[in-house]
Image (tube, rainbow, N blue to C red):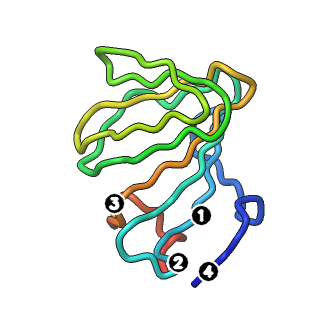
Amino acid sequence: MFVGHYTEVPEKDTGFEGVTIRWLVSPKLGAKNFAMRYFVLKKGAEIPLHSHDWEHEIFIMKGEGIITNGNEEHHVKAGNFLYVPPNEPHGYKALSETFEFLCLIPVKREAIPDDEWA
């Protein structure tokens, strides 16, 4: 078992301005099935529309934002959760001072950076 606090995990740049990620659970900790990430988007920051061949499970922790699949937009806020199926386009935009969410994905080599592997 491993117990940690998210603030003890280093924030990393995502390559998108105003967007950081913390890899809370990854293969580095021994996870074989799922990885858990904590994203923070500053107001106005965006992760553009993209897709992958793996699903996402997302829980909004703080703030408000827009989630889109390119055809429809959903205004979401703390307490909302969503499921993004494999290959469905998805993008995010922060509306509040910070927009923070947990995102779980399957452990797949192409989904997880090299430094998060054991």
Q: Between tags 4 and 1, which lies in front?
A: 4
Q: Between tags 2 and 1, which lies in front?
A: 1
Are the two marked residues, 3 and 4, in contact with CB atoms closer than 8 angstroms? no
The x, y position of residue 87, in whole percent, is 22, 40
Instruction: Please tell me which residue lies in front, 118 or 64.
Output: 64
Are the two marked residues, 2 and 1, in contact with CB atoms closer than 8 angstroms? no
Q: Between tags 3 and 4, which lies in front?
A: 4
Q: Amino acid at mark 3?
A: Glu
SS category of the residue bearing label 3: helix
Name the residue at 44% across, 54% down: 104
Which quadrant: the N terminus? bottom right
The x, y position of residue 45, in whole percent, is 62, 26
Instruction: Please tell me which residue lies in front, 82 or 97.
Output: 82
Q: Which mark is residue 2?
A: 4
Task: Choose the circle earlier in sequence order: 2 or 4.
Answer: 4
Name the residue at 62% across, 41% down: 61
Task: Choose the circle earlier in sequence order: 2 or 3.
Answer: 2
Task: Choose the circle earlier in sequence order: 4 or 1.
Answer: 4
Q: What residue is pinned by disc 3?
A: 110
Say if 92 sits above or below 75 in the image: below
Q: What residue is pinned by disc 2?
A: 28
The x, y position of residue 99, in whole percent, is 64, 32
Q: What residue is pinned by disc 1?
A: 24
Q: Between tags 3 and 1, which lies in front?
A: 1
* Left or right for 88, reference 68: left
Are the two marked residues, 2 and 4, in contact with CB atoms closer than 8 angstroms? no
* Left or right for 95, reference 7: left
